[in-house]
Amino acid sequence: MISKKRTWLDIIIIAIALVISALLIGLKFLPSEGDLTLSVISEGGESEYSLSENREIELMSNGISLIIRIENSSAYILSSECPNGICMKQGRAKRAGDTVVCAPAGVALIIKSGGVSHGDAVAG
């Protein structure tokens, strides 16, 4: 078995890697700049709503009825007639880039900052 003693250089490299990792993880929890909007993408197209105004949005997509709630600067699927209801268990989207999806209905909720999405992609 090969044994290697840790050197100061090893410790410094590990410390730098940990600091960089902590900073990258911390960036996700920083408040977003600008006004946040909710983009609702469905078979009917894309609609945008301000997260600063509480409201409920009724939507029919792919024959499935959904109610989307915007409340306290966050958005979530309040109710859905989809078979599994997984979309209702995804929680609240509140930061730029957060996404909630109801696959059977073909609906995606994406939080945007300044009108530009920070999400990866939406498959249609």
Image: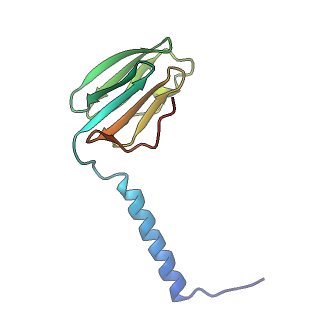
Q: Position of residue 35 (x, y in %)?
A: 22, 40
Left or right, 63 with respect to 95, comes to: right
User: Which color scheme does this rendered protein use?
Assistant: rainbow
Q: Position of residue 55 (x, y in %)?
A: 26, 22
Q: Is residue 94 above or below residue 10?
A: above
Left or right, 79 with respect to 2, comes to: left
In the rendered image, which quarter is residue 39 located in?
top left
Q: Is residue 37 above or below residue 2?
A: above
The image shows a total of numbered marks equal to 0
Residue sticking out furthest to the right? 1
Residue sticking out furthest to the top? 63
Viewer-side residue, 107 vs 13:
107
Left or right, 49 with respect to 105, comes to: left
| Residue at image coords 51%, 82% | 11
Q: Quadrant of the N terminus?
A: bottom right
Q: Is residue 118 above or below residue 100?
A: below
Left or right, 96 with respect to 66, comes to: left
Q: Position of residue 102 (x, y in %)?
A: 49, 25
Q: Position of residue 63 (x, y in %)?
A: 50, 11
| Residue at image coords 42%, 70% | 19
| Residue at image coords 47%, 30% | 101
